[in-house]
């Protein structure tokens, strides 16, 4: 039986529920999880290896601190310890999550004898992307593309969408070295129609970052309210635009109808989705980060719950949402069209249910957990126990 090392910056990040699902899918083969700030184990089942007190999301500042504190010897000790543990456990496959991780764990990546797989997710394929908290800095240094090309000589890349695949191919990684699979989500066996409620609930769930346009969603919501739509808007998530959104809310004539909840866990996210009537995100190519949505697991979570989607035409959204059938798509930056979509769906419960049922059916057909498991096990060449 294959024995897998699962490497990820942090499996507890609220916006990365997919990570917990992926561990659940692979738990029969995972013998060790390597992560920053790791606890002793995952759910008291799989031991964890602590890579240190940092995460790759802070890599610009951490590299500078590393140089000042001369932490190279500490990193060498960590690498040796992880290699030893992998040998003792018989690890023969390593699954890195985010293409940045095998590069940051460079010495381990070079010295481990296991088969290497690199799952790409989004910011790691934004080759000219900017740091969301400091957009004057690029996410990746000048050597990043060349390093990924070199890595592709011994690693298999796993892509989460056509969009991600195209980005990898654009820097010269051979298509033969890329395996594509979509994420999967739990989906009920039966569609539950939405009932008429006193007030429409519009939900945006995800990181508050420019490529998801939470500030523009607030403005579009205000436009819809001025035209008579009786609704409330819920924004759930954390990120660099939290202060911007809070300021827009406080200045809004509809402040009482805008709820900014901050980060939420897996259970709360599911509860919010179950209580919503419309799921929205103003997807766009971020003006600050120069990034687009590479997949968007939250969209298929909302679809699996039978919600119609209202979103900007950006990134991989056309791979999950069928415009006019499972939701309504608009051009990024077009607040009037987003507001019009809210009004159109808000005033027509039959349309909401028709699109919601189509969305639920599509989620079952293309984005089930079983489908992701089968694809992931195929790519990793795992065998049923």
Image: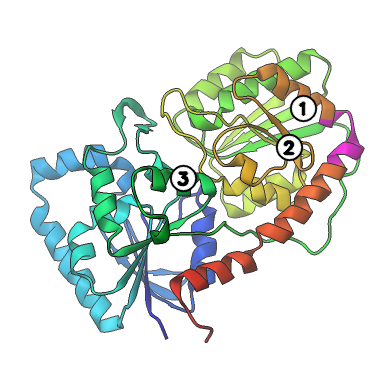
Front-most of 268 and 372? 372
In this orientation, does residue 53 appear?
no
Kindly report the secondary structure that dominates the magenta region of the rendered protein: helix
- The quadrant holding residue 153 is bottom left
Q: Give the Cα distance between marks 3 and 2.
A: 22 Å
Horizontal side of 169 relative to 369 (left or right) equals left
Query: Mark on residue 323?
Result: 2
Q: Give the Cα distance between marks 1 and 3.
A: 32 Å
| Magenta part of the chain | 345-352
Q: Give the Cα distance between marks 1 and 2.
A: 14 Å
Does residue 126 sit above or below 110 in this rendering?
above
Density class for disc 1 (Cα within 10 Å; few <14, some 14-19, many ≥20) is: many
Q: Secondary structure at mark 3?
A: helix
Horizontal side of 156 relative to 361 (left or right) equals left
Q: Residue at x 8, y 58 (%)?
A: 73
Give the residue at mark 1: 342
Density class for disc 2 (Cα within 10 Å; few <14, some 14-19, many ≥20) is: some
Front-most of 45 and 365? 365
In this orientation, does residue 159 appear?
yes
Q: Residue at x 38, y 60 (%)?
A: 177
Does residue 144 sit above or below 34 in this rendering?
above
Q: Secondary structure at mark 2?
A: loop
Give the residue at mark 3: 166
Mark 1 or mark 2: whose residue is earlier in sequence: 2
């Amino acid at each position: 039986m294959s024995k897998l090392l699962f490497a990820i910056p942090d499996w507890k990040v609220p916006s990365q529920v997919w990570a917990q699902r992926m561990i659940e899918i692979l738990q029969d083969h995972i013998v060790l999880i390597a992560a920053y700030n790791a606890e002793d184990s995952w759910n008291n089942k799989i031991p964890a290896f602590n890579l240190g007190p940092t995460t790759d999301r802070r890599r610009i500042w951490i590299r500078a601190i590393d140089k000042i504190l001369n932490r190279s010897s500490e990193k060498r000790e960590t690498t040796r310890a992880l290699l030893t543990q992998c040998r003792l456990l018989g690890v023969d496959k390593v699954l890195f999550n985010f293409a940045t991780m095998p590069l940051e764990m460079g010495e381990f990546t070079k010295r481990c004898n296991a088969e290497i797989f690199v799952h790409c997710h989004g910011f790691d394929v934004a080759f000219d992307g900017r740091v969301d908290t400091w957009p004057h800095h690029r996410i990746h240094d000048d050597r990043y593309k060349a390093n990924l090309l070199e890595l592709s000589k011994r690693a298999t890349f796993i892509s989460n969408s056509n969009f991600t695949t195209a980005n990898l191919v654009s820097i010269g990684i051979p298509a033969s070295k890329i395996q594509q699979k979509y994420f999967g989500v739990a989906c009920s066996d039966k569609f539950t129609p939405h009932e008429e409620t006193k007030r429409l609930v519009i939900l945006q769930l995800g990181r508050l970052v420019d490529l998801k346009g939470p500030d523009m969603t607030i403005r579009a919501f205000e436009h819809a309210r001025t035209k008579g739509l009786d609704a409330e808007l819920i924004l759930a998530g954390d990120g660099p635009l939290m202060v911007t959104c809070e300021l827009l809310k406080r200045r809004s004539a509809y402040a009482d109808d805008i709820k900014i909840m901050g980060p939420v866990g897996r259970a709360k996210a599911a509860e919010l989705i179950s209580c919503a009537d419309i799921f929205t995100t103003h997807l766009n190519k971020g003006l600050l980060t120069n990034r687009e949505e590479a997949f968007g697991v939250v969209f298929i979570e909302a679809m699996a719950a039978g919600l119609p989607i209202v979103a900007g035409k950006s990134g991989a959204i056309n791979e999950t949402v069928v415009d006019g059938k499972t939701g309504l798509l608009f051009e990024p930056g077009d607040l009037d069209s987003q507001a019009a979509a809210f009004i159109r769906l808000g005033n027509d419960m039959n349309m909401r249910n028709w699109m919601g049922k189509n969305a639920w059916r599509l989620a079952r057909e293309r984005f089930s957990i079983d489908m992701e498991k089968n694809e992931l096990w195929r790519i990793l060449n795992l065998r049923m126990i």
